[in-house]
Image (spheres, rainbow, N blue to C red):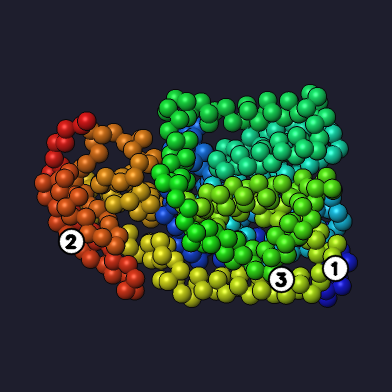
Amino acid sequence: MLDTFYKTPKKSAYLLILILAIFATLYNGILPLHGDEAYYWMWSHDLQLSYFDHPPMIAYLIYFSNFISESEWGIRLVPVIAMSISSLYVYKLTALISDEKTALNAVVIISSVLLTHAGYIFATPDAPLILFWTLSLYYSCRAIFEGKLLDFILTGIFLGAMMISKYSAIMLPLSLIIFILTKRRDLLLNPKLYLTTIIAILVVAPMLYWNYEHEWISFLFQIDHGSSDSFTIQPWLILEFVSSQFGVFTPVFAWILFYYLIKEKLFIKDEKLYFIALSVVVILLFFLYKSFYVSMAPSYSAPAYIGGAILLSIIIKKYELKKSFAIGLSIAIFFTLLIRTALITHLPELQRFMYKTEDIVARMYTYAQEGDKFYGAHLTTAAYIKFYLPDHPDTDVAIDSRYSYYDMVRDENTWHQNGLVLCRNDKREAELRKYYENVELIDTYKVCNKRTFYTYRVSNPKQIEKK
């Protein structure tokens, strides 16, 4: 059976991608929506050139998936399609610089690791980032090494699309610049390179214009969000980030990849492998540096493992690491299946911000009266209230919270109205009394002894003098 699998590598790779896409679509329909996903779904009903929290691509893609279904599985078609196309181009890029059997191994690797399976589930800006990162990597490789005009044009389009997906996308253009300056300075005299740059800027221009119109508010938020006022190095945060990379890409795969990147000095003697290696190392080093001072989520470095899977499959072939590959693959599949199963069987522990959200909103709705406005005490709570309530009424955040999309679109004159407020984990009576004369706790709902939700009825808004 294994011989047949590798006898037709292209067919096997495509079949594997298809099977995983079908499985992910069915699986995603079981899981309730995460608050962040509801927040981005809300954006898809108010399309803008950009948003406070992130660039707009995730909203645009969810907008199109809404035509198919606005259920959980429908919204999550965005990550399923994004990851599937990304896997397809992992195959194509590996085959371009190596051979089809090695390309199949790259798809097997990327399809087995936990990081990829998380990517198949959540409709967040990481999904379009991974999609357009992979497309940019593939077409820029073709453009640089084959020189065709169409590849330069497509590179510009996909680099621009990547940049309006998530701001960390800047790491790939940076790696391309490093490659050109260190290996292919002749491209600086090639008009096609500047055409690529112009096209990418044109795609990004609306997002830049939005930021300009809003005093660069989104850029400033992201800089502050991922930074620390103190430059005190915190070793435990570094250890947390490094260990998380071994977790999401599995210990064996991560060890092999990092070991040979160091041993081969980024494969600097082989232009194509060096090109891929830079796409891995630049983003990993950037977030490693950031982890000296602030906590970095494992997903931040996810794009590195597009090139990482490609390089790993080539390393395995070059050094004949068949046994290590088998062990690494077994570990990857075991942990992926373990977490996939646990998400279904141990919902309260693992679905901290997802478990029973629909039931929680439905219970709050039983107290609704005609004319009520619905509020959350946090932006994600407000978002999933909107998603799960009948007819998806407008919602808002009732108390002072971190600045968000809600602050940018609300009418301050009609912000606080009579209605219901849903709070999770903490009572918010004192904060609500800043805005309302009457605040009454009408329901306390404990979910599996893990989280407690409080529903308040609020009325008689106070006249707050605006600063």
Mark 1 or 3 closer to N-term? 1
Q: Nearer the viewer, mark 2 or mark 1?
A: 1
**Toward which corner of the image does residue 10 lie, by quadrant?**
bottom right
Q: Amino acid at mark 1?
A: Glu
C-alpha gap between disc 1 and disc 3: 15 Å
Question: x and y percent of residue 12 in the render?
Answer: 80, 63
The image's mark for residue 101 is none
Q: Residues within 10 Å of mark 3 (few under 14, many from 20)?
A: some
**Toward which corner of the image does residue 6 lie, by quadrant?**
bottom right
Disc 2 and disc 3 in contact, CB within 8 angstroms = no
Q: Which residue is mark 2?
A: 442
Q: Residues within 10 Å of mark 1 (few under 14, many from 20)?
A: few
The image's mark for residue 320 is 1
Q: Nearer the viewer, mark 2 or mark 3?
A: 3
Please give the name of the residue rendered at 47% of the width and 56% of the height, measured from the top-left corner. Answer: 234
The image's mark for residue 329 is 3
Looking at the rendering, in which quadrant would you find the N terminus?
bottom right
Q: How many marks?
A: 3
C-alpha gap between disc 2 and disc 1: 66 Å
Question: x and y percent of residue 199 in the render?
Answer: 68, 28
Could you tell whether 232 is left or right of 283 in the image?
A: left
Could you tell whether 132 is left or right of 429 in the image?
A: right
Question: x and y percent of residue 22 in the render?
Answer: 64, 62
Task: Work out whether residue 13 or residue 297 is closer to the camera in this orientation and state it.
Answer: 297
C-alpha gap between disc 2 and disc 3: 52 Å
Please give the name of the residue rendered at 53% of the width and 31% of the height, measured from the top-left corner. Answer: 207
> Is residue 390 visible from the viewing direction of this image?
no
Q: Nearer the viewer, mark 1 or mark 3?
A: 1
Mark 2 or 1 closer to N-term? 1
